[in-house]
Image (spheres, rainbow, N blue to C red):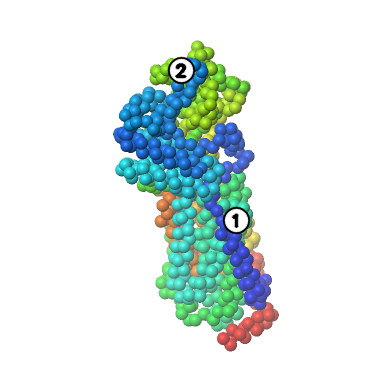
Amino acid sequence: MWQRLAGFVLKNRISLLIGLLAVTGFLGYQATHVQLSYDFVKAIPVHNPRYQEYLSFKQEFGEDGNLLVIGVQTDRFFETGFFKDYQTLVHHLQLIPAVENVLSIPTAVNLVKNNQTHRLQPAPVFDSMAAADSLPAEKDLFLSLPFYRGLLYNPATHTYLMAIRINKEVLNTSSRVQVIGAITQAAEAFGQKHHIAVHLSGLPLIRTVVTEKIAHELRIFLIVSFLLTAFILLGFFRSLSAVVLSMIVVVMGVIWSLATVVLLGYKLTILTGLIPPLIVVIGIPNCVYFLNKYHSEYAEHGNKIKALVRMVQRMGIVTLFTNLAAAIGFGVFFFTQSAILKEFGIVAGLNIMFIFVISFIFLPSILSFLPAPRTKHTSYLDSRPIRQVLVWLETMVFRYRPLVYGGTALVVLLALVGIWRLNSVGYIVDDIPHSDKIYRDLKFFESNFQGVMPLEILVDTKHKRGISQLRTLQKLDTFTREIARHPEFSRPLSLVEGLKFARQAYYLGDSSSYAVPNQFDLAFLAPYLQMRGDSTSNFSKLLSSFTDSNRQIARISVNMADVGTEELPGLIDSVKTQAQNIFDTSRYHITYTGTSIIFLEGSRYIINGLIDSILLAFVLIVFCMLYLFRSWKMLLISLIPNMIPLIVTAGVMGWVGVPLKPSTVLVFSIALGISIDVTIRFLVNFKQELHAHRHDISATVKSTIHNTGLSIIFTGLILFAGFLIFCFSGFGGTRALGWLTSLTLIMAMITNLTILPALLLWMEKSLLRKSEKNEPLWDTFDEKEVALNELGLESLEQKSDQS
């Protein structure tokens, strides 16, 4: 069949190439429309209860993750020049498109009691037009308002904060980059003028900067991987045409992958952004194996067309199954419940098969037009250094097999001990280096304001106007004070704080009156709380955002430190226990949501989805191997060399303290899909050579080590270098993905060139018994040689001979 496919490709090479280039041109146009995704909740299934609670919260109270904070630490804050410039900064930020409001000290309001209208009227604390000598009095007034203490300033550390709310619709588009850039530029200009460090944080900033940095890195890594791969290929093949052909194949693969993202209606996420570099490192081995077989066949008989047919015949089935195994390794993510994993799985799976189609059509077609390889192009087949390595491997397999088994067993035992040390933990700023300004600024806010990560708690009284009852208000106050005792939480903000502020204003600004109104206070405060004509003020918006329209649900908003997925569940459980001691569960229902909870749930879904997918991929690959070799013993032999690298990598993670998180769990799927390729290539080559060596297992193993080992080592080095590039990333997760995958692939190369042939020799007696009984060792895909004239290629052969 594969010979006839080769004949079909070579006979129709011009039309196939035109079609391939036309499709690539169309997909190239589509690829120009690819966009980055800024949606972080796609990790969670839409039917997940936590996700539904989060959606309900956003529908009622708005976005919680659209707050950017700016902080400064200084003793000069209320000096005239500094404070006036700070006011100017706030005014400038308010004018930036997509900035909805700025909560800051210059925009702070005080509630003033009006006995004539019986209303509490918001009045600015600071007058931007007032004379400079009025600032001390305004400062004293502001510091007498406990409502803002811990919210906009920390008196103990002389730190000051402003919170900028950004339009949520803009945050889901690429325009967020310009908005965040404008805010950052204005803040940094202020800091430079006053020679002071300005700290910025918040989810809009973190997500934007991290996404842009990762996208920038991936573009660089893609270019570097192209150049590095081209350099290695040139050093190996000594042929510019071989390098150019391989590069064209992977360039088309990258274009197709980006176009697939667009055509499926997706956007580039942190996962799908990895696919173009993956296509490079997966597509290059396809080219290497095809070209290596073409060169070895031509070196044997000197017939170019026959070499091309043999290349397709021998490598077509191998490459199909290796790409299929890799596609399964990634494609199973489609069956998870996480949208971000589904997208990654379907795009990666499809494009791994696409790269097979591209290389299968493009390489033999173009090679048929090019001159036959010269001697210098095939000299690598007798490379002395690699031949010495192969001889050493042969010696280890045939003479020191017990040492190979013993050494492997010891390594696996140490790895199993390391696996017990593995833990699973993730942080919102997980992959950011500790030296990066984003990380240092986040820690600044955690030190001075206990953090900026949103946690939302909703207290449902189960009936309308339930939060107006004094008993409920007192419980809310008790609950918020209990939350504030946790060092990981900032001072909670709720309706209760607004009522305390109102009580202070009712008693003429006496700070000792900042407390929950009692039954007596409520009777007098009721008419004063209806602040007419000020619905647009920041304070009014603030109060109205902490209760629903029916006054049934009270919202408690807390900022917290980025404590990680390991500590967060215990912290939330502690808060839940306190809530149960305060609120009667038959009368109140409490919901915990917000970005922090969604992040925890998303991380859990991604990790569990990745683990489940790896198990499913393993099962599907088992069936592929069983179909390919039709032998349970061969199945066992094929799996052992691929399980050992995964076990070793997991053990190394445990020993060096690399936790399980989405970026590191992905290593196992990538490594399984790629390392199984080496096993398939070795065993198929072994199967094809067995008949030529008259079923002599030892001779066939030795021949396979030398014939296939050359390309295995070469592709192993390419893959190692390709993934090692990620080690130069500025993000911990990407670095871990790089060196862990490189480690796994090198281990897979070693085990497939030592353990795999050793196991084949171990089953030699069993294979020989079958041979003596004239039983087939396994079903084979090999087919009888078909003459070139039967394939309709005699004219091509004549042209080749004439050239």
**Does dot 1 land on a helix, a strand or a loop?**
helix
| Residue beneath the point at 44% across and 41% down | 93
378 versus 597 height, above or below: below
Q: Distance from label 1 to label 2 (Cα)?
A: 59 Å
Question: Where's residue 744, x and y in %?
Answer: 47, 56
Residue farthest to the top, as pictured: 520
Q: Which residue is mark 2?
A: 506
Amino acid on which the number 1 mark rests in the picture? Val
Residue 766 appears anywhere in the view: no
Q: Nearer the viewer, residue 646 or 262?
A: 262
Left or right side of 163 for 609 = right
Camera-side residue: 427 or 385?
A: 427
Instruction: Report crowding for label 1: few under 14, some 14 to 19, many 20 or more residues within 10 A (C-alpha).
Output: some
> Is 469 situated above or below 185?
above
Residue 798, labelled with which disc?
A: none
The quarter in which the C terminus is drawn is bottom right
Residue 188 seen anywhere in this rendered image of the structure: yes
Q: Secondary structure at mark 2?
A: helix
| Mark 2 nearby-residue class (10 Å; few <14, some 14–19, many ≥20) | many
Image position, residue 605 (x, y; %): 56, 43
User: Label 2 amino acid?
Assistant: Tyr
* Among numbered discs 1 and 2, the one appearing first in the sequence: 1
Q: Which residue is mark 1?
A: 262
| Residue at the spot 64% in from the left edge and 75% down from the top edge | 13
Q: Nearer the viewer, residue 30 or 588?
A: 30
